[in-house]
């Protein structure tokens, strides 16, 4: 075993069907008296219901959370939080809403209680992102790490089936890359493999019965583990490609992860054989990249960048951007190999090992 450092983040996790009933207790344990509830416009009603559980400890709902945390909205939210005298935020929703809470925390230090309703995993990470002038600035800061996370699978029942599948595959990407991270350790690898196993079981079950509570529980449990991996170790080629495609070509977040993951794994397969074995074992298959590709395809997730609206003419620029600002990856990065990977991902071809 190689020497390692494991830094665990001290979030309190409350998990279970109906766990939202503990919201008032958890807010009290945080010591918050004036909680501002955050949501997207689409989830306002659910956010209001959560606020009503807090009685006088809620000081309103700010429902303007949006994908990639536009800086103007973050500023507006900070002003609103100050105006109502908030001493904590409750992020009720997916990565976009939790991202808004993080932007507020970064500016004001307000503690976050997160109630995730997708599988994106942001609630377990100290990573924030704020977008201004078309550029998403990301960073790590422990101030943005939620203090308490309530995982209530009942709240994910309304997540449309297609979004559930893409969001679950998005979560799997964190664990898969975490297994070959330069700073991985035995604890994060255990979480990663277990997270992959849970999501690999949940995806077919959710696809067959989106209202099945056991599948919803398993998926959210997997999302927690995969998010914890994302929050603990560094990511590599896959996340860099998705960040580039989302940031510079406006491709949708979770869907882009679904398309790119099998190809990024194939690129790294030779250089990271132990990680591939663990991914394949978690999915009860022999080959990690094709296991992920087949899982996505079998359950209706997108498998090509073309179907996400990317122009073929943009692939050269995407490959060049993905090679900028050197970063660690198990397999060294070359423009030609990345361009070939993107070409296959664009066309929806099966993943092909780096040669
Ligand atoms: P999202 O938060 O943008 O949600 C997508 C849509 O689904 C929204 O309209 C939302 O209101 C709706 N929705 C969410 N949960 C629902 C539910 N249970 N029922 C019905 N509708 C629901 O999507 P996401 O994929 O969760 O988050 C993506 C964003 O999160 C991206 O900006 C990404 O960069 C960020 N992210 C950040 C981190 C991090 O560590 N900082 C990690 C993962 C994702």
Image: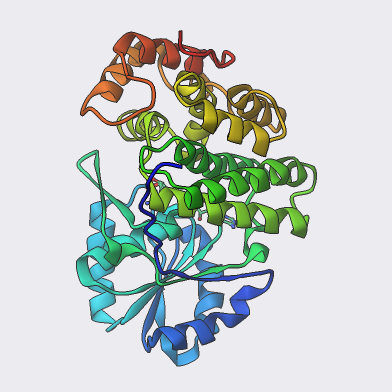
Q: Residue at x 39, y 55 (%)?
A: 6
**Foreground pick, 285 / 162:** 285
Quadrant in the picture for residue 79? bottom left
Q: Is residue 345 visible?
A: yes
For the residue pair 322 and 211, the one nearer the viewer reads as: 322
Q: Residue at x 51, y 43 (%)?
A: 175
Q: Position of residue 253 (x, y in %)?
A: 45, 39
Question: Where is residue 143 shown, x and y percent of the image?
Answer: 28, 66
Of 106 and 195, which appears nearest the observer? Answer: 195
Indicate left or right for 310 with 280 as reference: left
Please, is residue 55 above or below residue 137 in the view? below
Q: Identify the image's colour scheme: rainbow, by chain, secondary structure or one colour.
A: rainbow
Q: Residue furthest bottom?
A: 56
Looking at the picture, tell me which residue is in the foreground, 18 or 251.
18
Residue 119 seen anywhere in this rendered image of the structure = no
Indicate left or right for 116 with 110 as reference: right
User: Which residue sits at x=40%, y=61%?
Assistant: 8
Percent x, y for residue 36? Answer: 38, 77
| Left or right: residue 55 compared with residue 112 | right
Which quadrant holds residue 303?
top right
- Residue 286 x %, y %: 68, 24
């Amino acid at each position: 075993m190689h020497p390692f450092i494991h830094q665990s983040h001290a979030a309190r996790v409350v998990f279970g069907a109906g766990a939202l009933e503990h919201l008032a207790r958890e807010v009290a344990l945080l010591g918050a008296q004036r909680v501002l509830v955050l949501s997207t416009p689409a989830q306002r009603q659910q956010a209001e219901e959560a606020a009503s559980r807090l009685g006088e400890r809620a000081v309103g709902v700010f429902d303007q959370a949006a994908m990639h945390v536009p800086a103007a909205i973050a500023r507006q939210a900070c002003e609103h939080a100050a105006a109502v005298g908030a001493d904590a935020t409750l992020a009720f929703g997916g990565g976009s809403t939790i991202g808004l809470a993080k932007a507020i925390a970064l500016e004001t230090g307000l503690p976050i209680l997160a109630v995730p309703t997708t599988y994106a995993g942001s609630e377990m990470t100290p990573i924030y992102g704020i977008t201004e002038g078309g550029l998403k600035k990301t960073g790590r800061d422990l101030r943005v790490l939620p203090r308490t996370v309530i995982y209530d699978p009942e709240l994910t029942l309304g997540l449309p089936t297609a979004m559930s599948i893409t969001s679950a595959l998005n979560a799997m990407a964190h664990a898969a890359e975490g297994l070959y991270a330069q700073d991985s350790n035995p604890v994060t690898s255990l979480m990663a493999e277990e997270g992959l196993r849970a999501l690999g079981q949940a995806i077919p079950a959710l696809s067959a019965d989106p209202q099945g509570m056991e599948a919803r529980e398993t998926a959210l449990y997997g999302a927690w583990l995969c998010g914890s991996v994302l929050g603990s170790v560094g990511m590599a080629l896959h996340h860099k490609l998705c960040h580039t495609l989302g940031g510079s070509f406006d491709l949708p977040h979770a869907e882009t992860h679904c398309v790119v993951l099998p190809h990024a794994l194939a690129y790294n397969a030779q250089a990271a054989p132990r990680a591939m074995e663990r991914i394949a074992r978690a999915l009860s298959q022999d080959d990690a990249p094709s296991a992920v590709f087949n899982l996505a395809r079998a359950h209706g997730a997108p498998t090509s960048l073309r179907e996400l609206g990317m122009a073929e003419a943009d692939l050269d620029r995407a490959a060049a951007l993905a090679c900028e600002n050197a970063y660690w990856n198990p397999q060294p990065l070359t423009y030609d190999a990345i361009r070939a990977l993107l070409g296959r991902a664009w066309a929806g071809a099966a993943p092909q090992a780096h040669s």
